Image (cartoon, helix red, strand yellow):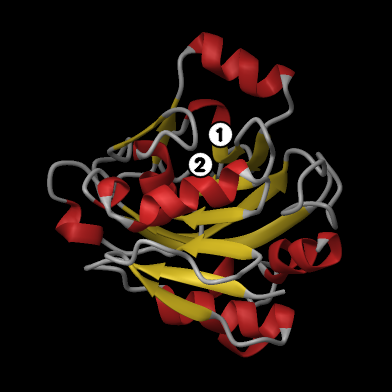
Amino acid sequence: MRAAIVVFPGSNRERDMALACQRAFGTEPVYVWHRDTHLPDVDLVTLPGGFSYGDYLRPGAIAARAPIMDSIRIHAEKGRPVLGVCNGFQILIESGLLQGALLRNAGLKFVCRETTLICGTSASPFTSEMQAGKSRIRVPVAHHDGGYFVTSDQQKMLEDQDLIAFRYERGDNPNGSTADIAGVLNAGRNVLGLMPHPENATDPLAGGDDGLVIFKSLLAMA
């Protein structure tokens, strides 16, 4: 599996994402600059964490209008996987590829710590190697605007269509997200956005490798 990592001004987790892809896929990912208009021939597109454009206006709002985003939409429309982590999740929300909104953390402070995630569905290429409601992974979070918000109607739709990929374990919600939601899928199940950083949990020497299961699931479904 070959991955592309989209880099925006202010991205700061692209190297971490590259190392995670290398460990999981055994191939070197390619970097794509935000001003590019075409994606290379890749299987997976990733949008890493950071502070694109300094989070001016709203986190992800300016990056969502970058030239490369048109090609990412086409990639997603073809059913190919797109993964957005933290700021990448914010960009996917702002671009309309995922539903909902990401608001200031409930505590109004930047949160940087580990959290436990529970798999919400195994019916996606990102979670195919996990068991819904049973599999748990320990991964870090690092964000200031990570509270995922949806209306009650949107929440019901996500639950009815089994599009909640991950929830924070009860009592371990770091940002006040609606219904403890940590990551969601699009209707086609090929676009995943989540606030926690699985790419930073792919090496036992760095504290754990629970996050590898997301990348290994993608490889198993390739």
* Residue that mark 2 sits on: 173
Q: Position of residue 122 (x, y in %)?
A: 82, 44
Quadrant housing residue 36? bottom left
Mark 2 surroundings within 10 Å by alpha-carbon count, few (fewer than 14), some (14 through 19), many (20 or more): many
Closer to the camera in the image, 200 or 95: 95
Question: Where is the C terminus found, in terms of image quarters?
Answer: bottom right
Query: Is residue 192 visible in this depiction of the protein?
Result: no
Q: Amino acid at mark 1?
A: Asp
* Residue that mark 1 sits on: 180
Q: Position of residue 62 (x, y in %)?
A: 21, 48
Q: Position of residue 15 (x, y in %)?
A: 44, 82
Q: Amino acid at mark 2?
A: Asn
Mark number, residue 112: none
Helix, strand or loop at disc 2?
Answer: loop
Residue at the image point whose x is 71% and y is 46% from the top: 118
Helix, strand or loop at disc 1?
Answer: helix
Question: Where is the N terminus found, in terms of image quarters?
Answer: bottom right
Quadrant housing residue 57? top left
Mark 1 surroundings within 10 Å by alpha-carbon count, few (fewer than 14), some (14 through 19), many (20 or more): many
Query: Is residue 188 visible in this depiction of the protein?
Result: yes
- Name the residue furthest top: 153
Residue at the image point whose x is 43% and y is 44% from the top: 92
Residue at the image point whose x is 64% and y is 46% from the top: 78
Q: Is residue 66 above or below residue 187?
A: below
- Name the residue furthest left: 56
